[in-house]
Structure formats: structure tokens, C-alpha cells
Amino acid sequence: MTIHQSHIQALKKLAGAKGASDDQNVIQPHLAEPRNKFIGKTPLVLFPNTLEMVSKFVTYCYDNDIKIIPQSGNTGLVGGNSPDGSDTQIILSMKRMDRVREKDALNHTMTLESGVILADAHTIAEKINCHFPMHLASEGSAMIGGNISSNSGGINVLQYGVMRDLVLGLEVVLPNGTIWNGLTGLRKDNTGYDLKQLFIGAEGTLGIITAATLKLFPRHKQKNTAFVAIRNPEAAINLLSMVREISGDSLIAFEIIPRLGIEFNLKNMPGCQDPLMTDYDWYILMECATSLDSDLLNLEVMMNKILKNAMERGLVLDGVIPKNIDEIRNLWNLRENISEAQKFEGASIKHDISVPVSKIPEFVRRGLAAVKEIVPNIRPVPFGHIGDGNLHFNFSQPLDMDKQEFLSNYSKINKIVYDIVVELGGSISAEHGIGSLKLEELERYKSITELGLMRDIKYTLDCKNIMNPGRVIR
């Protein structure tokens, strides 16, 4: 049943002039996620700009059994931030909730509202001579609330952890409209359950995050980047171990890129340049950074030692250390643009998985072999955060295969890949979440006990199932 017009008018009255819109031109950008796999309908988008307004909207929806889809930067990739096609769900956009509540350089924290864009959060931290280490390809549009709700990962996880590790406190509007103020800058607090952890990674199914207190770190005074060619993923894991041993725990990023990923970039993304004169099957993009001055730790000397040792041991075949910002940017564009470049190559089947770092080579070997048995000429593009065990295990359609014929293998390929992942002690979703896309897989691979606990938590906090229904848990 569609939402009665009286509810639309009541919510618009609560919202005021800029707090809501039923204009389809305004609504349209909120209806689809970036890959256009999920495109829905809604009669109304709410744009609160205060905590109290969020609470009023949610209270009204709770009292009248109206479903809410919380939305931040709308950069999610699993259908967790788009309405369904029923036209019975209202979008609550957090983009006007973008204030800085507090900056505390001495405590190394900042408290931001959930609509602050991630790239802006970096600037806010820099202005108090601090560093916020969460970095994503979508950081120019992704928002803090969405990063927390999806427990974002990114390129610096092996040093700083995922978003869950960077959050000290939260402010949340619960599904009945009640406000929970759990904002705190404390690093030690053993006064009962750590409630904030319920909402981190819950994808908006348990409440709406309105603000967060985040950890900050000393600013980097040095940063060194290197792009190297390697033989295979086994060499990558051995190189990772060696780099961590030598680097004094200054390694912040360690990304694997296949040759096909480079070729897709060179073909489809203007301005990209091949860093090496010779083609190789696999590459590593790594970065070390430190807050120490060079007289205490010289990263340039250290990186040269790493590469010298790696080449002597046969772990690195070739490589380059960029000389300026433009060269560094080119290297990171080759990594960050892979997904975008892949769009120009036709249909793709993608997986965001993690396994223990030591199991990466076995996973890649078995995964590629198993998928090629189904589609022999498939084009694999496995890339990503190999330093923390997370791979974007992607495949592009063969050049000689029809798009629909290729996509008819979607479920079969997913099951084969995920079976191997789980057998190796891994996860079917490393950083993108479950959303609507992976509901069936979650039910297949999670235990009855785990699913039962998740349903119990959902029912306890949202007994009417109004908050992002049909996502994460049925």
C-alpha cells in the first residue's frame, strides 16, 4: 500500500521549506546506487539539518508504520541505500547534517555530524595539525555516517583499522525516535555494553547515526610510495612480510593490481600512464608514512633498502619510486580507477571478499581456476587491499561472449567463489556490506545461531521493522 498523501503533507509540514521534497527532479538522484543494480521509488525525500528534526521525522514514521531508508552520500554498492520499487519507503537524506561539533587536538579527536563528506573530514583534521586515516576512492562524495554504517575499509586498514576502529562515540536516533547520546572522546570506558558497536556496520537497519566522535592521529611528516612488479600473489605475501619487518610499522598501504587492470586504465581512463617500460602479470603499489622527522627515520633511505632487499631475494622484478606529486597521483589513479575503467569493458561480476593474508595465494589460484572452468575466456581483474586480506575479485565478460549469456553465470560463479572463501576462513563481504545484494549469501554462510542473534537485535531495537527493511537481515 502506497503512503497516504496525508502522511506526505504532515512530514512536509514538520520539515519546513528546505527539509523535504516530493519533486521528482529532486528525488531522482536518490533512487539508484552507483552501479544502477538497484533503482527504486519514493514519494518523498526528507532533508533534516538538526538532530531534533531527525527525531521528529523518525517518531512520526514509527507512529504511522512508515518505512525509512537512511541515505548518506549514496556511494554504497550492495543496494543498502536505495528504496525498493514499492513506492512505500521514504528516503531520509543526511546531507544537510554537516556541521563540526567539536575539534580537540590535545585529545586527538573530532566530533562531526554524519553528513560531513569524508574528504572534508581530512581537511578538518589537518587544520588542527592532525590526520584522519580513512581513505576511499569515493571520499569526495561518501559521508561519515555512511562510512560508519557500512564499516568502511579503504587503503590504510593494515595500519589504522576499519571504520569500527576509528569511532570512539556515536549519537543515534533509534527507530522509535528516541535519541541516544553516546558521543565520547574516551579511549577507555568499561561501563557495560559497548553500544556504539551495534550501529557500526549495521547499514542503517538499527537506527540513524547523526554524529560521531572520531580518532585522530599525528600528521604525516614523510610519505614514500613505490610501484613494483612481482611474479605472483605468493611473492606479494612474502614481500608484505619483508616490508613490515623493515619498515618499523610505517607501512600504511599495500595494494595488488593485475596487468589487465593497468590495461583497462590505459585504454579507458584519460591521462593514465604506464609506470614501467616492461609488462608484468602483477604489481604492488605500496606506501609508507610516518609522523617522525627524517633525522629520526628517513623513509627514502628505508624504501630504497626495501627495494634492494626485495630484488636480491627475487620478490620484486622491476619498480619505480615516483619523484613528485603528479607521479604519485598517476600511480594511485591506476589503482583507484580500476572499477570505473572496468565499466567500459562490458558486463562484470564482482566480489568483495577477505581471507587470512596467508591464504591469499591459495584463494587466487583456486578461485581463478574454478571460475575459468565455467567461462574459459573470462577476463579476471582481482585487485585491492591484499595487505589486509581483502580482494575485489572481479571478472569482465569475454570479448567473444554476449552480455546476457555472461551474466547468466552470475549465481554459479558467486557460489563457487564464496564456497572457497568460506572454506579458507574468509568473509563474503570485506568492506561493502550486505545490503540487499547479499542477503541470500549471508543466510547460506552464516550459522543459525548468528542469524538468530542478528534477528533478535533487530527486533529489540526495531520491532516494527521500519528502519531500512530488507537489508542485512530479513
Image: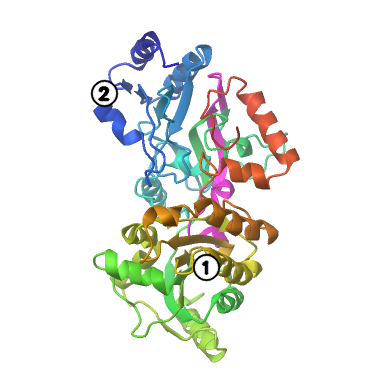
403 vs 204, nearest the viewer: 403
How many numbered badges does the structure rendering display? 2
Callout 2: few (<14), some (14-19), or many (20+) C-alpha neighbours within 10 Å? few
Residue at 41% x, 24% y: name it.
Answer: 50
Mark drawn on residue 23: 2
Cα–Cα gap, marks 1 and 2:
48 Å
Q: Is residue 447 magenta?
A: no
Compared to residue 448, the image places residue 297 above or below, namely below
Compared to residue 5, the image places residue 239 above or below, namely below
Q: Do the residues under discs 1 and 2 have CB atoms within 8 angstroms?
A: no
Residue 428 in sight here: yes
Q: What is the three-letter code of the residue carrying label 2?
A: Asp
- Residue stretch in magenta: 152-180
167 vs 421, nearest the viewer: 421
Residue 133 image point, x, y percent: 48, 55
Residue at 43% x, 69% y: name it.
Answer: 222
Report which residue position mark 1 lands on: 372
